[in-house]
Image (cartoon, rainbow, N blue to C red):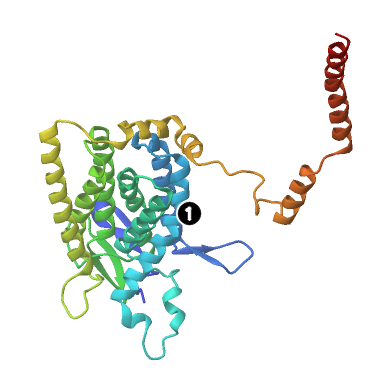
Amino acid sequence: MNIFLTSPISFPGLGIEGINPPDGFCIPGTNFEIKFYGVIIAIGVLLAVTYCLRRAKQFGVTQDDILNLVLICLPSAIVGARLYYVIFEWDQFFGPGIPWYRFLDIRSGGLAIYGGVIGAVLGMLIYTRVRKLKVLPFLDLTGIGLLLGQAIGRWGNFFNREAHGSVTTCFLRMGLVENGELQYFHPTFLYESVWNLTGFIVLHFLSKKRKFDGQMFLAYLAWYGAGRMVIEGLRTDSLMIPGTSLRASQVLAFVLVVAAVILWVVKSVQLKKTGKTQLYVDTEEGQLVVSGQFYQKKNKEQPQVEENFPGNGEPADALSETEEIADEPQPQEEAQSGETAAKESQPEEAADTEDKQQ
């Protein structure tokens, strides 16, 4: 339970005192409450998708595929974010006297960003595999969009008065009231929002000079992971690896940063030897995507299916009857063939008569 949910918020270093934003609102005429936590995340998703749509062609992907991915990756991201949180907070959801369906309630929070990223990437891998598309251009583009979405989405924690750090006296300290006492904490949601927004701007311009597919996604993993490692260490509500004192997201961030840096260096060394960039958008297939002809060509290359084929709208028995009727000689055709035969025989009879006369 969040003990700060109704607490006034202050940022004395910024001259902000005693603001008390609601955590949600009810639809007029109903008792159904909508949480600002979800509204802010939805705005973040919308801005990220809009950005990806505007830059789709620069990465050799279609806007239709981006929209299709939203329908697939958004649900898979929510599932991944919830599972990640539930796994590391197992006792909170499964135990004596706890309803089994409690883990389905996400209205009060409990979504882990890293779990959401993992779920979204899995959904993307499945989609591109089924559609036989290159996954790296999609990862590059969505990596940049993710930073924008996360920068906005973190403000959902502001309305919930959560995701803050330990007690501090720093310039950006956030004041919350607990049991009538005002305390100041690290506003870690603010730190991460600023870090992600800065990363979005950096990666946006860096992407215009990228050298290989996958470079921007590696940059996303390294940038976000580096910031998350530091910020996670300030938080008081971290998900812990069971049986240890290690913060799950901090460990994962460290692993991803190291992996991203190694892969970046290896790929850069390979490119330095060849002296050429390797971008999908510059290939023939990528240019077909940019011109909007990719799927047209793909459809033309597929074998055409005969229309009159059993199972394509006409029963096999009906087809066989039609064939039998077609094989039978028609009266009109018989009459025509008879006339033709008579005409052909007349010259032959005339020739025989002349021979006899001679």
Task: Give the residue type at disc 1.
Answer: Leu
The image position of residue 11, as x and y in percent, is 28, 57
Query: Furthest residue to the top?
Result: 358
- Local secondary structure at mark 1: helix
Badge 1 local density, few (<14 within 10 Å), some, or many (20+)?
A: few
Q: Quadrant of the C terminus?
A: top right
Front residue of 53 and 199 = 53
* Residue 98: quadrant of the picture: bottom left
The image position of residue 293, as x and y in percent, is 46, 32
Q: Tell me the residue at 51%/41% (across/down).
A: 303
User: Can you say whether 43 is above or below 55 in the image?
Assistant: below
Q: Determine whether, in the image, residue 333 is placed left or right of residue 182.
A: right
The image position of residue 106, as x and y in percent, is 43, 69
The image position of residue 322, as x and y in percent, is 76, 47
Does the image show residue 151? Answer: yes
Front residue of 125 and 254 = 125
Front residue of 305 and 181 = 305
Query: Furthest residue to the bottom?
Result: 96
Q: Tell me the residue at 16%/55% (across/down).
A: 259
Front residue of 198 and 337 = 337
Q: Tell me the residue at 23%/52% (across/down).
A: 221
Q: Quadrant of the N terminus?
A: bottom left
* Residue 63: quadrant of the picture: top left
Does the image show residue 171? Answer: no
Name the residue beneath numbered marker 1: 71
Q: Determine whether, in the image, residue 339 is placed left or right of residue 274.
A: right
Q: Determine whether, in the image, residue 44 is placed left or right of residue 357.
A: left
